[in-house]
Amino acid sequence: MRFLLPLLLVFSLFASAQNNYPQDYFSNPLEIPLILSGTFAELRSNHFHSGLDIKTQQRTGLNVKAVASGFVSRIKVSHYGYGKALYITHPNGYTSVYAHLQKFAPEIEAYVKKHQYEQEGYEIELFPHADELPVEKDSLVAYSGNSGGSGGPHLHFEIRDKDERPMNPMLFGIDVKDTTVPVVKSLYVFPLDENAFVNNSQSKQKLRLTALNNGDYVAESIQAVGKIGFGISTIDRQDLAANSNGVYNIQTFVNGSRNFELDFQCFSFDETKHINQLIDYEHFSKNKERLQKLFKKNNPLSILKSTLNDGVLSIQDSTNSVYKIRVADYKNNESWVTLQIKGSKNSMSAPQPTKTTPYFIKANETTNLKAVNVSVDFYKDTFYDDFYIDFEVKNDTLKLHEDVVATMKDFTISYDVSQYNSDDIDKLYIARLIGYKQFPSYTYTKRQGNTLTASTKKLGTYALAMDTIKPTITASNFKNGQWLSKYRFLEVKIDDDESGISNYRATVNGKWILMEYDYKTKTLTYDFNDEVITDTQNNLKVIVTDNVGNNSTFEALFYRK
Ligand SMILES: [Zn+2]
């Protein structure tokens, strides 16, 4: 038996690489084969994707089924984000999540509407008890849709553990056909300190990639000295769709020893913000390409496995190294990148001096920047690294660096507006100026006396803007005075320039009606099946308020019998 032990150990290593999660517990939430437009943990704006995006044949209204028995533990309806979302908690401790839904299955829909009518609001969050809405495995729970911040019909599906951490659903045997290897889009090398040089330069450099027939790559050789690291842009495609999705695992090796690993099995929501430190944030901000750093510098992300030197290479003069990157999808289809590094002293340029400004940020201290009418407060640990920040105020325009530095938390911008008359103050808001044309974009603004305050995570240019324009409200599928007896829906378009819509309220003959708001189509929709309208002659009244308090009222008559 003694001899068997090492063999068993080897075997169990491979077994644990498979995983210990239940494999047949969860079924497919749809009645069609799973084809993905988004994979778990793929890189999105300010977050990792927390589930799978399952394609729904460009349609809405497909049956969504409970992937296992359990009970509806949470229902959330919001204009943005997940839109209409359903959470089912299962006896094994996991919760499945279904989002961007069109509507819920009849019993759940009735439960939601009852609470929406009680609270007189479309946006709602409910936590039913275990005995209120039990569900069987494979029973209908909802219909797929495109609600909330969804860019096209699909089902967003998640599995969370008992600590609310999103898990990669593939770990549970949810199967997607994939024999296609990942694609490496680009590779960069970074000199990491003032003594590091690559090809006699201290700047980040793009390395030419040559694709081989088997899907692997060779990158151009480099000459380097000092501490360097790499960054990669890579995607994966599955077999049945052309969508560019995220990869599952990235490992790097120096002369055969592994020195870095990224593994997308699970993460927690409070660490998802660190994505901006995982990617080269400045590169993303300027080029819209997400370069994942293959070294761990000031990043607490749990998906970064601690490995030799955290992925940083220390290159000595007169040495030769081979650097390899392995990119794999969940099905272990892998692509390799190989490159030669020749250690050689810098012979050309002297170290570049750091650009300085009068304002130095120490990442682990609070900082206040102040001009006559503007004040900016950074809490400690807003930034990952110390740096010199640009800070300049001209009249009402605040130039606060550029949006090229990753932040971990909100900071506040305060404007003293006492030089404005009080009527104007009511219409002022803090705007972020975007793009070449410096288009003003509303930043949520709180007012207290003569002070306006905005909280934001983005550096950049801000200014005071004024919104004096009221929202617009128009009938969409009917005309004033029309008979609507055969109509199922009543539709109204609402819109607002500048600060944007804050809230709306619709009544018929003085009674509140539920109008569902889709910001993408700017449409409010009432469903006559709600049966709150019983009179023949009906007076519809819709009030819409924008973010600085301008409001409009729309009224129309319609008839039904
Ligand atoms: Zn999604």
Image (tube, helix red, strand yellow):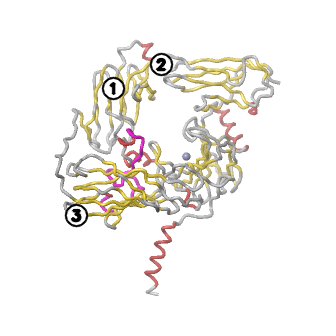
* Residue at mark 3: 319
* Residue at mark 1: 398
Disc 2 packing (10 Å; few <14; some 14–19; many ≥20): many
Q: Which residue is drawn at the image coordinates 45% and 13% (left, top)?
A: 423
Q: Hey, what amino acid is under mark 3? A: Thr
Q: Quadrant of residue 454?
A: top left
Q: Which residue is drawn at the image coordinates 41% and 29% (left, top)?
A: 434
Disc 1 packing (10 Å; few <14; some 14–19; many ≥20): many
Q: Is residue 306 visible?
A: no
Mark 3 or 1: the one toward you: 3
Q: Dots 3 and 1: beta carbons under 8 Å? A: no
Q: What quarter of the picture does the C terminus occupy? A: top right
Could you tell me residue 261's position as x and y percent?
39, 59
Residue 101, compared with residue 299, is above or below; it is: above
Could you tell me residue 188's position as x and y percent?
34, 50
* Residue at mark 2: 467
Ligand 1 contact, mark 3 (Cβ < 8 Å): no
> 482 and 533: which one is in front?
482
Tell me where the magenta segment starts and ends, as one range: 285-310
